[in-house]
Amino acid sequence: MKTINSVSKKLYVLLLVVFISANVFAQHPDREKIKALKVAHITEQLDLTEAEAQKFWPIYNANKEAEHQLREESSKRRKEQSLDKLTENEAKALLLDMEKTEKQKVELHSKMLNDLLTVLPAKKIIKLYQAERSFRKKMLDEYRKRHANKKGERK
């Protein structure tokens, strides 16, 4: 019984990754490929049931999209202004805007945590944070490995 459940979970993860990959590769292949890998990594690490996954992913994806929008808006505002040409008052306003953005990030994170607590046990939410960290580490290690290979090719 346990083997069948384990196999079905792995099949579910595989199908989920294939489905997500096939639907979104046309827009931004690298970004979407990374997203698909992250989905698979998180699903595997959290050992989500099908019912948990159906409730978890909409909450998680909505939060990540809101965080992305916040980053984009903040980045755009900072790029619009040249640091050398800022007056002291404009610099203060920019700092206050940056602080506001950080507070919004904390609020988004807090909302996601509260929403996730309604659909997942606390232990799985802690595993989520660990899975996100381990995924970022994997991506950074992969980047470093590829970057090191490119440096070696130039010599």
Image: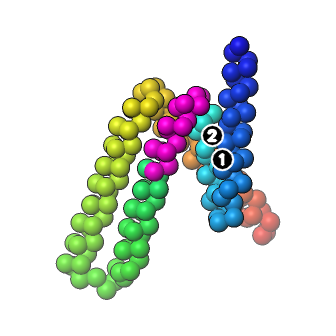
Taking the spot 25% from the left edge, 75% from the top edge, the residue there is 91
Query: How was this image coloured?
Result: rainbow
Q: Nearer the viewer, residue 53 or 142?
A: 53
Outermost residue to the top? 1
Dominant SS of magenta comes to: helix
Q: Disc 2 marks which residue?
A: 41
Taking the spot 23% from the left edge, 66% from the top edge, the residue there is 96
Taking the spot 66% from the left edge, 50% from the top edge, the residue there is 20
Q: Quadrant of residue 101?
A: bottom left
User: Dots 2 and 1: beta carbons under 8 Å?
Assistant: yes
At label 2, the amino acid type is: His
Q: Disc 1 marks which residue?
A: 37
Callout 2: 10 Å neighbours few (<14), some, many (20+)? some
* Residue 51 place in picture, x, y as percent: 54, 30
Look at the image and give the residue range highlighted in magenta: 45-62
Callout 1: 10 Å neighbours few (<14), some, many (20+)? some
Asked if residue 138 is among those painted magenta in the image, a careful observer would answer: no
Left or right of 64 on screen, residue 34: right
* Residue 105 place in picture, x, y as percent: 35, 53
Asked if residue 49 is among those painted magenta in the image, a careful observer would answer: yes
Q: Nearer the viewer, residue 78 or 28?
A: 28
What numbered label is drawn on residue 53?
A: none
Taking the spot 65% from the left edge, 58% from the top edge, the residue there is 24
Dot 2: what SS? helix
